[in-house]
Amino acid sequence: MQTTSDLRGHLFPDTRVFTGYAAPVRIEGEVHDLEVVGTIPRELDGAYYRNSADHAHPPLFDNDIFLNGDGMVHMVRLENGHADLTTRYVQTTKLKLERKARRALFGAYRNSFTDLPEVAGQDNNTANTAVMWHHGKLYALKESGRPYELDPLTLATLGERDFDGQLQSKTFTAHPKYDPETGECIAFGYNTQGVADKRIEVYTIAADGHFTRTEAFEAPYSSMVHDFLVSRNYIAFVICPMVCDWERVQRGEPYWHWDSTKKTQIAIFSRQEGVKSIRWYTCPVAAMQTHSFNAWEESIEGSTVLHLDHFVTGSGWLSQFPDIHDPDAHERPPFGERWSFNLSDGQDWFEIRRLINHVGEMPVIDPRYAMRRATQFYFGTSNTALGPMLPLGPKGPPFTCLGHYDETRDTFDFYYAGPDSSPEEPYFVPRSADAPEGDGWLMCMVGRRAENRTDLVILDAKKLSQGPVATIKFPCRVHEGFHGTWVSAKALSW
């Protein structure tokens, strides 16, 4: 099998994914005492972790996508107003085999039929999407594989984990949900045996890491189930027409295609009763949930109404995967929506309304308000009234701003990162355990594209437009990433 890289040599392709600010960084190391502009709040004692897809080797195919990079975790340790940076690759089976060979051996995203013969049957998990802190352990997550445990102090890889045999699936979500009242983690896996199927497994994991419930249900078709929602009493899955056809995969085509002829369907079931209580709802339009804010319930005139707050688009992630019917289709921007389900009326119907009438993605809330009503919403966005859009990147238009929507006042506030600067996903850290909702800080990586460098900014979450209270300057660029988390020094026992 002759690959594109055989013809190109040991070079990265000259494509949007591998050039400019998106180019692989591949640097592992430590920087002690980063430069700080402003003052890091003394209450911020702990570590911010985030995951990224950073190709360690030139890919087998020139048209490789952003999502197929190797997991590189970045940690910024904050203590007494100082900041230290650590960057480490997750030592996956894939990375170890490719490092030994000094070249790429695995092919297209999640498609083992495009791998080289010498790695046939080997795990292609890149562990590149998110980080999870639960039961005192840190994990790197990718929804196509099992978690990899990392040393939270050094980022050294401790190994792939199945939670002492409790996880039978070969896959585990990159978007687990955490119950702030019970300490439970609610998680799931799809395509659980590594091939396209309709089975979805759901897990309830106690605060000590013990699986208290594992069960499964079938979706209408094999769908990308990237995120889901959990309220105090219910679990909801949005099954969208980003579909996998195994015959296409075997032919070497992309793992996912957007098929707008299929209906978006929503599964809702009780956390207490489990999947035996599942009910299905049909969305009136083809829609994809990109990422979720929160789910919550309220009683209205004696009826239980479940609200799902999330970003939704009318297309799939066409920057990464094609439209099965229209290869020239363009990705549509996501908007914040609230889907409301009357669980008491027995009808296959729900109300859709625009919650955030502003293009956005990478949504977060104050994590103390997960699974109950939240009113403060934060997200990545752009605002041309503050600055121009940036050139298209490998995962779509880069953000130029962070947004804050205060539902109680119906107001927006924006942090504009500056010319040639691109904020990534924010993360909310409360000022204290008993602070009011939204009283705290947003942490966010910001790409300084003109300088080919990265900052970590800390903003007062109630005063985004006033700019950072602290800007932690990296002396180099770290790769654009996806999802992160904050862990206090107390939790880490530092």
Image (cartoon, grey):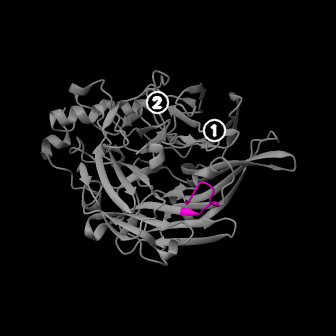
Between circles 2 and 1, the one closer to the viewer is 1
Residue 141 in sight: no
- Of labels 2 and 1, earlier in sequence is 1
State left or right for residue 382 relative to residue 15: right
Q: What element carries label 1?
A: loop
> Within 10 angstroms of label 2, few (less than 14), some, or many (20 or more) residues?
many
Q: In the rendered structure, find residue 196 and report the number of the disc placed on it.
A: 2
Residue at (25%, 52%) from the top-left corner? 30
| Rendered position, 388 above or below 304 | below
Residue 489, position in %: x, y?
A: 44, 49
State left or right for residue 94 relative to residue 411: left
Quadrant containing the C terminus is top left
Q: In the rendered structure, find residue 385 and report the number of the disc placed on it.
A: none
| Rendered position, 371 above or below 272 | below
Residue bounds of the magenta highlight? 431-440
Residue 247, position in %: x, y?
A: 41, 30
- In the image, 70 versus 61, the foreground residue is 70
Quadrant containing the N terminus is top left
In the image, what residue type sits under mark 1? Thr
| Residue at the bottom extreme of this rendering | 385
Residue holding disc 1: 182
Residue at (63%, 56%) from the top-left corner? 434
* Residue 479: quarter of image: bottom left
> Within 10 angstroms of label 1, few (less than 14), some, or many (20 or more) residues?
few
- In the image, 32 versus 186, the foreground residue is 32
In the image, what residue type sits under mark 2? Ala
Q: Is 436 part of what is drawn in magenta?
A: yes
Residue 127, position in %: x, y?
A: 37, 39
| Rendered position, 478 above or below 226 | below
| Residue at the right extreme of this rendering | 301
